[in-house]
Structure formats: C-alpha cells, structure tokens
Image (cartoon, rainbow, N blue to C red):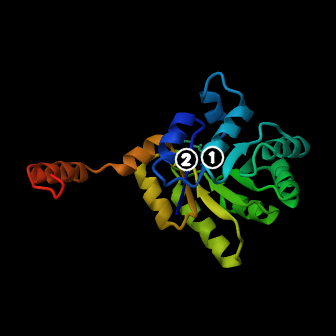
C-alpha cells in the first residue's frame, strides 16, 4: 500500500517526506484554509516541489465548465497535480473532460459503491472513499473500501482506491487489509503508526546493555 499525506501544511509534509515513505499528497479546501495567509496555488506549487508523486488539489467551484477550467489551471501548476473533483453530476462531467485531456482526477467524497461505479465509468484515476466520516454516522467505512477494491479488480479498472478520512492507526491497518492501493494519512496518525512502547523500551535496553562494549576504532 502506498502512503499519501493528507495535509496542506508544508512543515508536516517535509518531515514525513524525509522518512522516505511518502508517495503523494492530498489536500482539500478545508486543509488549505487551515494554513493561514497562504495563496492556494503557491501552496500546491510548493508541495509539488517537495514530494515527487501525485498531489491532489481540489476544485473550488461548482458547475462542470468552471471545474474543468479550474482543473486545467491547477494541472498547469505541475505535471504531478491530480485534480480532485467532488462526486456529483457536474463532477462526473468534469472528470470525463479532464481525463480526456490527459489530466488525472481524484473523485472525492465517495460514500457508496454506486458513487464509486459512476466515478470509475467517468474515467477517474483515483477514487476516494471517506472512511472516518462513514464511521461517524454508524456505517462501516472500511467495508466500502473493500467493496470498491473488489469492483476494480473484478472489472480490471486501472483506477486506484485512496482510503481517505483516515483518523487513526487502526484505519491504516484495515485499509491495507482491505486492499486499498493508497491510504492518505494525517500527520498525527503517521506518528501514531511509528510508536510502540516495547520498541522504545527495547532500544533503551539495547543501548544500556551495549554501554562499555569495546569497539574496533576505540
Ligand atoms: O482525504 C479526505 C480527508 O481530508 C477528510 O478527512 O477527517 O475531514 O473526514 P476528515
């Protein structure tokens, strides 16, 4: 499973990129808005200069024609930009048009298998089911991920599933078990994944035991 980071915060992206495990970045208008005093296009450009992989930037307008125009503008920022388009009628038209012009799209706000089927039929390169938000309303978000992966495998679509709205390390583990191609993970959850008390204790013990051991170079 590939890892994207779900943030528009430059220092978070730089830190996790330095771990050597990052394959891409997803942003959305709420994440961009959390970064105060920034220009949307500048943030997207800077992210693309840090991470060498797909960078999702979401359209902020309604109506297919406007989405297509904004999508083209975003795609022109960098060759790795993926245009994130919401799941609705206008979004489907925009996905079809942008993909037809060779611009990759990520269909976002997917909450059902039928929505995923429509996004796949429109030609989206990435499908983003929102796991946490489904869990929030008492549904099993990960079942949706599993089902979309099965549909993609069954029909041989080339699209990749991005398990999105990931809230905790259990979501990441279950996304991998469900066969998600990608998990887009918040900064905090990357740190939670890294930690285990027995690892910390083990490192401390190894260092303590090794103290005073002679080394070849003194
Ligand atoms: O990738 C989608 C994600 O940003 C939504 O997450 O936690 O706002 O549901 P959340």
Which quarter of the rendered image does ligand 1 occupy? top right
Q: Which quadrant would residue 63 be assigned to in this image?
A: top right
Q: Which quadrant would residue 161 be assigned to in this image?
A: bottom right
| 2 or 1: tag closer to the N-terminus | 2
Q: Nearer the viewer, residue 33 or 117?
A: 33
Q: Residue at x 71, y 43 (%)?
A: 57
Q: Label 2: few (<14), some or many (≥20) within 10 Å?
A: many
Q: Which residue is mark 2?
A: 5
Q: Nearer the viewer, residue 115 or 5?
A: 5
Q: Which mark is residue 8?
A: none
User: Residue farthest to the front?
Assistant: 217
Disc 2 under 8 Å from ligand 1? The reply is no
- Label 2 sits on a secondary structure element that is strand
Q: Position of residue 202 (x, y in %)?
A: 19, 53
Asked whether the residues under the numbered discs 2 and 1 touch, taking CB atoms below 8 Å apart as contact, a structural biologist would say yes
- Tell how many labels: 2
Q: Label 1: few (<14), some or many (≥20) within 10 Å?
A: many
Horizontal side of residue 210 vs 15, given as left or right: left
Disc 1 under 8 Å from ligand 1? The reply is yes
- Label 1 sits on a secondary structure element that is strand
Q: Residue at x 62, y 23 (%)?
A: 36
Q: Nearer the viewer, residue 11 or 207?
A: 207
Q: Which residue is mark 1?
A: 26
Q: Position of residue 191 (x, y in %)?
A: 40, 44
Distance of mark 2 from mark 1, alpha carbons? 6 Å
Q: Position of residue 169 (x, y in %)?
A: 41, 51
Q: Residue at x 17, y 48 (%)?
A: 204
Please tell me whether residue 143 is drawn above or below residue 50 in the rendered image. Answer: below
């Amino acid at each position: 499973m590939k890892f994207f980071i779900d943030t528009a915060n430059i220092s978070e992206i730089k830190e996790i990129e330095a771990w050597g495990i990052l394959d891409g970045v997803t942003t959305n208008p709420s994440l961009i808005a959390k970064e105060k005093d920034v220009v949307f296009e500048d943030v997207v450009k800077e992210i693309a200069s840090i991470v060498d992989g797909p960078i999702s930037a979401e359209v902020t307008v309604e109506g297919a024609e406007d989405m297509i125009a904004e999508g083209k503008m975003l795609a022109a920022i960098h060759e790795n930009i993926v245009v994130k388009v919401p799941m609705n009628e206008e979004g489907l038209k925009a996905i079809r048009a942008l993909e037809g012009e060779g611009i990759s799209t990520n269909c976002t706000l997917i909450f059902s298998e039928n929505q995923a089927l429509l996004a796949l039929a429109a030609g989206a390169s990435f499908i983003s089911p929102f796991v946490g938000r489904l869990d929030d309303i008492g549904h099993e978000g990960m079942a949706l991920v599993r089902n979309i992966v099965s549909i993609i495998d069954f029909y041989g679509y080339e699209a990749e599933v991005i398990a999105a709205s990931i809230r905790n390390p259990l979501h990441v583990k279950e996304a991998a078990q469900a066969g998600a191609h990608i998990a887009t993970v918040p900064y905090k959850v990357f740190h939670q994944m890294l930690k285990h008390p027995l690892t910390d204790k083990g490192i401390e013990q190894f260092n303590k035991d090794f103290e005073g051991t002679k080394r070849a170079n003194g």
